[in-house]
Amino acid sequence: MLPKVYFVIPCYNEEEMLPYTIQKMGEKLQSLIESKLISDESKVVFVDDGSKDRTWELIKAATKDKRFLGIKLSRNCGHQNALMAGMGYSVKFCDCVITLDADLQDDINVIDEFIKKFEEGYDVVYGVRSSRKTDTFFKRFTAQSFYRLMRAFGVEIVYNHADYRLLSKKALEFLMQFEERNLFLRGIIPLIGLKSTIVYYERQERIAGKTKYPLKKMLSFAFEGITSFSVKPIKYITSAGFLMFLLSIAILIYAIVQKIRGQAIAGWTSLTISIWFIGGLQLVALGLIGEYIGKIYKEVKRRPLYFIEEIAEDAQEQ
Ligand code: UDP
Ligand code: MG
């Protein structure tokens, strides 16, 4: 049986891009079906993320062709949530989902490879950019710093992988068990486990329309990524507090020595000591409270504790 593949494409104000995307995806779907890689019941699912332009009209018009499907969100919920909406819908009907951006910056020619990997038994296939040639220096620099920072904070993510990926039905079902509100898919997918692999591709430039990720959104996305996965920043406060505390002891000795040598003016010793001592104490206390908040934060996420990939029972001898 050929796999039924749903392509999930989030769209936010993409009227300039969509006519091209719809045509290209239609052609790609056709060629995949003809080369007997995917079932002819496969579909392209466009998720309109509360666009303010003609995006939804274009999507609706495209659905005259029954290989296209449209989902309209009531407001702009953000890229990650739009992806979740599309995948949450598709999981009921498909064997696997491939998510990609509406601007087709992610090379659609490697889809064949994605599907081959899926057929080989991989549940998660990550599309990874082989280089960042098409990026501006600024984007390249910020993106790389972001990945480094995430690593430093102990968040496991795949380097140079955006949201171009294939997920099997099983992986999708696991993903749907995450109930957290601050979604950062790149961080969550590795937590699912299952067999995963990487397919490399060259990222193209955006053909039409503008990026929907201006600097402000990018920064908040990065911040979201770190704070929804790591409590390390809190731990750093605690460490800083202890450091201050040690320092205050050194200052204490220094201040007393100065006093004995008669080099301190009246009041300086006690003032200096208290500033450092209280400062250190406050930071330690803040860090300690932070540790508890960190625990609460982990609890409220209600992340699934485990996923059962398979159960073996009554194995019959062949
Ligand atoms: N997008 C979305 N909601 C948003 C912002 C972006 O659905 O609030 C979609 C957008 O239409 C595109 C994808 O997310 O399909 C990636 O956005 P974009 O290409 O602008 O990001 P970049 O490639 O510049 O990082
Ligand atoms: Mg893009």
Image (cartoon, helix red, strand yellow):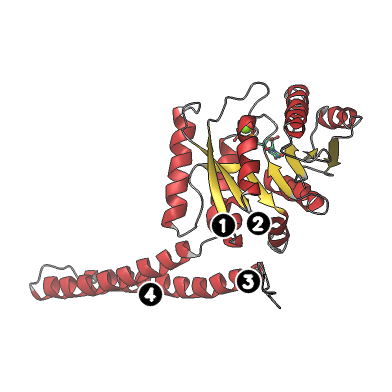
Residue at image mark 4:
281
Callout 1 crowding tier (Cα within 10 Å): few <14, some 14–19, many ≥20:
some
Q: Which residue is drawn at 80% across and 32% down?
A: 52
Residue 236 to residue 196: above or below: below
Q: In which quarter of the image is ligand 1?
A: top right
Front position in the image: 1 or 245: 1
Whether disc 4's CB lies below 8 Å from ligand 1 is answered no
Q: Distance between the residues labelled 3 and 1?
A: 13 Å
Q: Do the residues labelled 4 and 3 touch (CB within 8 Å)?
A: no
Callout 2 crowding tier (Cα within 10 Å): few <14, some 14–19, many ≥20:
some
Q: Which comes before the other along the chain, label 4 or label 3?
A: 4
Task: Give the residue furthest to the left.
Answer: 261
The reply to whether residue 168 is visible in this rendering is: yes
Please state if 314 lies on the left or on the right of 129 as rendered. right
Q: How far apart are marks 3 and 2 (CA)?
A: 20 Å
The quarter of the picture where residue 261 lies is: bottom left
Q: Residue at x 32, y 74 (%)?
A: 277
Q: Is mark 4 on a helix, strand or loop?
A: helix
